[in-house]
Amino acid sequence: MELWDIYDEHRRKTGKTMVRGNSIENGNYHLVVHVCIFNSKNQMLIQQRQPFKEGWSNLWDISVGGSAIQGDNSQTAAEREVLEEIGYQIDLSNIRPHLTINFNGGFDDIYLIEKEIDLTTLQLQYEEVQQVKWANKKKVLELLENKQFIPYYKSFIELLFDIQKQHYGSIIE
């Protein structure tokens, strides 16, 4: 049983928890994290979900994502998800998310990082990930168009690629 901390609309923990899978009450929120790992060639590490995974089975997705569990903050949740899903140790203690997307029932913190990772060294979580690969923006958008990628907005995927080398949304001249 996985427990999630409950937050208020201002991202303050309420001291309450909920069980994953239960409906979240109106006015309560939970924390989700995504980590997009890019390499120096402006390629994103993408993962293909397992065929038996509930929800978007067999589809490609951005590098890593998941819900924060009880006791996590944004950074520790993101570090844990990267380690669990692809077996890569990362330190995000001094990094803030590039983006936060508010959705009904929660907050989604999105980290954009650059790392040179040898994919053969990764330990993929069998329950979640069947394979990983590097893909440039054109390839990810092609997978999205062909319904082989989780159905994110095209503009969202473009934004991830466009700002990943920038400093929080501003163009550095």
Image: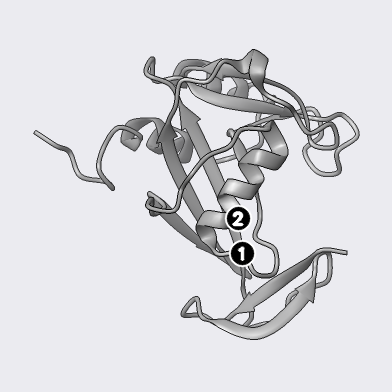
Image coords of residue 8 (percent x, y): 55, 82
Front residue of 82/151: it is 82
Q: Where is residue 59 drawn, in percent x and y?
A: 73, 29
Quadrant of the frame with the N terminus: bottom right
Q: Name the N-terminal-most of marks 1 and 2.
A: 1
**What's the distance in space between the residues labelled 1 and 2, CA to CA?**
5 Å
In the rendered image, the vertical position of residue 94 relative to residue 10, given as above or below: above
- Residue ID at (86%, 43%): 54
- In the image, 80: left or right of 17? left
- Residue underneath mark 1: 72
User: Which image quadrant for residue 4?
Assistant: bottom right
Left or right: residue 42 compared with residue 6 = left
* Count of all numbered marks drawn on residues in the image: 2
> With respect to residue 16, does 137 lie above or below?
above
Give the SS element for disc 1: loop
Q: Is residue 15 visible?
A: yes
The quarter of the rendered structure image containing the C terminus is top left
Would you place residue 172 above or below residue 29 in this image? above
At mark 2, the secondary structure is: helix
Amino acid marked by disc 1: Asp
Q: Is residue 67 above or below residue 30?
A: above
Q: Residues within 10 Å of mark 1 (few under 14, many from 20)?
A: some
Residue 104 visible to the viewer: no
Quadrant assignment, res 69: bottom right
- Image coords of residue 90 (percent x, y): 52, 39
Q: Residue at x 46, y 41 (%)?
A: 156
Tell me the residue that label 2 is attached to: 77
Disc 2 marks a residue whose amino acid type is Ala
Disc 1, disc 2: CB below 8 Å? yes
- The residue depicted at 64 percent of the width and 48 percent of the height is 80
Q: Position of residue 107 (x, y in %)?
A: 54, 64
